[in-house]
Image (cartoon, rainbow, N blue to C red):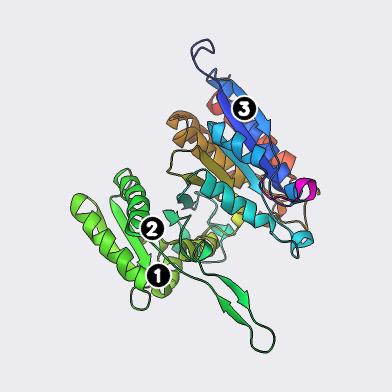
Amino acid sequence: MSTATTPPLHLVTVPGDGVGPEVTAAALAVLRAALSSAGIRMEVSEHPIGGLALDQSGDPLPEPTLAACRRADAVLLGAVGGPRWDRRKPRPEAGLLRLRSGLGAFANVRPVRVMAGAEMHSPLRPEIVRGTDIVFVRELTGGAYFGKPRGVEGRPPDRRGVDTIEYSESEIRRVAEVAFTLARSRRHKLTSVDKANVLATSVLWREVLDELAEAHPDIELEHALVDSFSLRVLLDPRRFDVVVTENLMGDILTDEAAALVGTLGTLPSASGGGDGPWLYEPVHGSAPDIAGKGLANPLGAIASTAMLLRLSLGREDLAKAVEQAIGAVVQAGSLTPDMNGALSTQAVTEAVLAQLGELVPA
């Protein structure tokens, strides 16, 4: 593909805190190699977010960062937060929540796939996790994280904490449409997780999903209560395909599902659906205890670039090549310590690049 006819990818990176800069650098190296093989140029600008931004400006999401992200074709995030900012108000994580909201990123897409040969990394039995391929769709800008009123009031011993869970029909409908569309591209099966036996918001959630199912007759919709689903997904994960749920439940369930692969370090995610660009980030946190030591697992960040290639550029061929390179590295055992390997972040990145070079030579 000619660079004269293909516009460059305008990418904004927000590496953030802890291991964020390390895994972002790894992801950029792999993304640059994949794009170069197809003759696609990339223009990159870096901006602060989270604790770093707090230290620099007192704001976890400075306005120039948000403005740059809104102008980008795609945004690549590392991680935010750490114990050194635990007593700061606002917290670093507030910057991430505002970024998602500012980009109109109401849907978070998190694949959980156990690659062939990687079953032994899960604490669950290999015969349980083998062949697992689930995509979670989590509503991202509503629910308890954004509802008002919220806060802690009063003085000891009579303090009172309040959080509000609130969802409108339109918020539920738009994220559910993302899930139905995704299910159509896969096995045509959608599981909606709620707590309709207790929560009013879940009653509405279930009603809206049932109404939408009538417009998607080719998709098999089932409902599951969050408590029973959290057990079933560990006992029989292969029975699930696409799973859609609200913000708080999705946050918990997607981290729980990391047990299926054995580590958060390999899991990617993408957030979008609105008018702004998609935001790509590994699922793992900032891991400040290993920051700067070359021990961070870069595979989640690298896998996030595969999602970028697929969703933002429509390059399924390049996305599959990156995923195949990751799979080859995992099968070869070229891994960081969190996966019982002995390689550094840089060494694992170089292993992925070597595999990618064989799949998509420049």
Q: Amino acid at mark 2?
A: Val
Q: Quadrant of residue 64?
A: top right
Q: Distance between the Cα atoms at labels 2 and 3? A: 32 Å
**What residue does disc 2 label?**
243
**What residue does disc 1 label?**
229
Q: Amino acid at mark 1?
A: Phe
Give the answer, above or below, for where 76 lies relative to 228: above
**What residue does disc 3 label?**
32
Mark 2 residue crowding within 10 angstroms, few (<14) / some (14–19) / many (20+): many
Dots 3 and 1: beta carbons under 8 Å? no
First in sequence: mark 2 or mark 1? Answer: 1
Q: Is residue 269 magenta?
A: no
Q: Is residue 353 at least partly visible in the picture? A: yes
- Residue 105: where, in percent of width, then height? 48, 46
- Residue 140: where, in percent of width, then height? 48, 55
Q: Secondary structure at mark 1?
A: helix
Dots 2 and 1: beta carbons under 8 Å? yes
Q: Quadrant of the C terminus?
A: top right
